[in-house]
Image: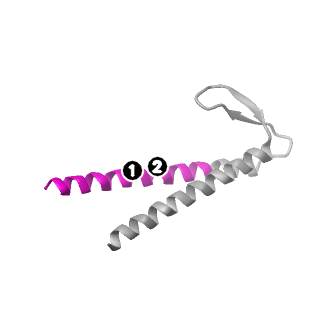
Amino acid sequence: MLTTRIIISCLVLIIKFKCTFVFQIKEQKVVVDELSNLKKNRKVYKQQPNSNIFFLADRTEMLSQCKNTLDELKKAHLELENSEKAKIKK
């Protein structure tokens, strides 16, 4: 009975974790799309972590960083999916 509760708790945590990944991936896709469609002369500002302060940033550099972040999120999500499938097969 206790192990069943633990397994259910773990499954709930995994589902919440996956939902967070999916949300972050969608959010990052929007950011990449918005930066990709900006005109060359538009200014881009980057928010400082844990602050309401924004600094002027290079558009191409920000686009590159956002694409890298998106790739990392997709990779982590894929690893989570693969590890989950491996656990199910066992």
Residue at 61% from the left image edge and 26% from the top image edge: 51
Instruction: Find residue 20 and name its label.
Output: 2
Which amino acid, mark 1? Lys
Q: Which residue extends farthest right?
A: 41
Numbered range of the magenta stretch: 1-28
Which amino acid, mark 2? Thr
Identify the residue position indicated by label 1 in the image: 16
Give the structural element (helix, strand or loop) at label 2: helix
The image quadrant of residue 18 is bottom left
Q: Nearer the viewer, residue 34 or 72?
A: 72
Q: Please, is residue 6 above or below residue 79 in the view?
A: above
Q: Are marks 2 and 1 in contact (CB under 8 Å)?
A: yes
Report x, y in % for residue 33.
69, 52
Report x, y in % for residue 60.
79, 47
Q: Is residue 29 magenta?
A: no
Report x, y in % for residue 26.
56, 52
Residue at 39% from the left image edge and 70% from the top image edge: 86
Q: Nearer the viewer, residue 78 or 52?
A: 78
The answer to whether residue 46 is left or right of residue 74 is right
